[in-house]
Amino acid sequence: MIRRLRYNEIDFVKYSRCLEKSEQKKYSATKDFLDTTSEKQWEILVYNDYEAVMPVPFVKKYGIKIVHNPKLCQQLGIFSPKDDVQLNEAFLHFLEKNYLIRAYPLNDCNQLQTKLRLKKNFLLYPDSYEKVYARYSPKRKRKLRLDDEVVKNSEIKTISYEEAKLFIENNMIGLSKENDLPDFMRIFEASYHLNYLKFSAFFYYHKIINIIATYSDCNMVALLGTFNDKDYVKISGASVLIDTVIRETIETHIFDFEGGELPNIEEFFRGFRPELKPYAIIENSKKDLLKKFGYFLISGKLL
């Protein structure tokens, strides 16, 4: 039986145990990550006595609860000891029947009969660094061979959130600085102080020209952000930073590139020769949400 539990009803010991033993384990479904990204606005669907779970984050608009994945939270879905199509379909049916859904991502292990839109993601699986590097594209290997002058006048350092903050704010592309940037910085700061997030910086002549933010948990290292000074793109500092983290972690951790939908980003990621691991997403337009809201209002099903 599938039932819904609000945040204050969740047994987090059982929830964490289910996640840890699941075939689909993802850092993005952990309590700490969801507490940080959604500001504790999430609940779960649970099968029997935590035999399977499905975290459900939401936002509230005019007092109405709408399911929406938080910023920087790429994949959620169903977590169980063995991925089961019929069980996944049962969770999906319960979710769609009882919630208003704007956007809800499943995970790359969830098998479904229902046809949903797929989004791209790329992963590198644990292996020796030598074997991983050998598979890099010729172009990526060339980018990693820095000129002698650059090598002589550059260094890579792990820096604090406070040291990274201004550079990230000045070099974050594609976001509304008024609406989105404060949320991203809040998540970065909280995750850093919980010791999950690391900032790696490429210095050139003692000046930061590239930063990457990586989140480590559940035997995964996820690339949550790449920030570049556009005046120094030819130096390929971002490639060097990512390669450095891969070299340090790939023998024991999955490296998650966290995306690949944009053509230029996909091309960049593919240079490291990762595996394409698509995941399904439930999406509804604002118009469809209004229609469903009317139905829920009449039927009394609004949770």
Image (tube, helix red, strand yellow):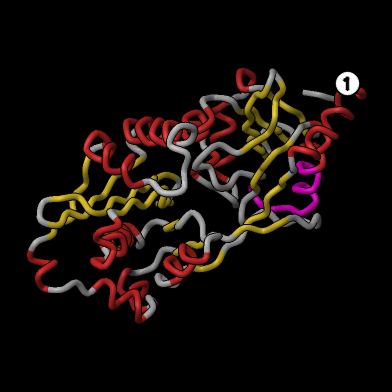
Position of the C terminus, as image quadrant, is top right
Residue at image location 41% in from the left, 63% down from the top: 126
Q: Position of residue 156 (x, y in %)?
A: 18, 55
Position of the N terminus, as image quadrant, is top right
Crowding around mark 1 (Cα neighbors within 10 Å: few <14, some 14 to 19, many 20+) is few
Tell which residue pokes out farthest to the right in this image: 299
Which quarter of the picture shows residue 44?
A: top right
Q: Position of residue 180 (x, y in %)?
A: 48, 36
Decide which of 107, 46 is in the foreground and name it.
107
Residue at image location 52% in from the left, 33% down from the top: 34
Q: On screen, 286 above or below 207?
A: above
Magenta segment's dominant SS is helix
**123 relative position to 18: left or right:** left
**201 relative position to 9: left or right:** left
Residue at image location 36% in from the left, 39% down from the top: 196
Which quarter of the picture shows residue 295?
A: top right
Q: Position of residue 94 (x, y in %)?
A: 80, 37
Residue at image location 69% in from the left, 19% down from the top: 62
Does residue 248 appear in this view? Answer: no
Which quarter of the picture shows residue 246?
A: bottom left
Does residue 203 appear in this view? Answer: yes
Task: Give the magenta part as a residue range.
Answer: 80-92
Q: On screen, 92 above or below 82?
A: above
- The residue type indicated by label 1 comes to Gly
**215 relative position to 53: left or right:** left
Q: Secondary structure at mark 1?
A: loop
Q: Is residue 118 magenta?
A: no
- Residue under pointer 1: 300
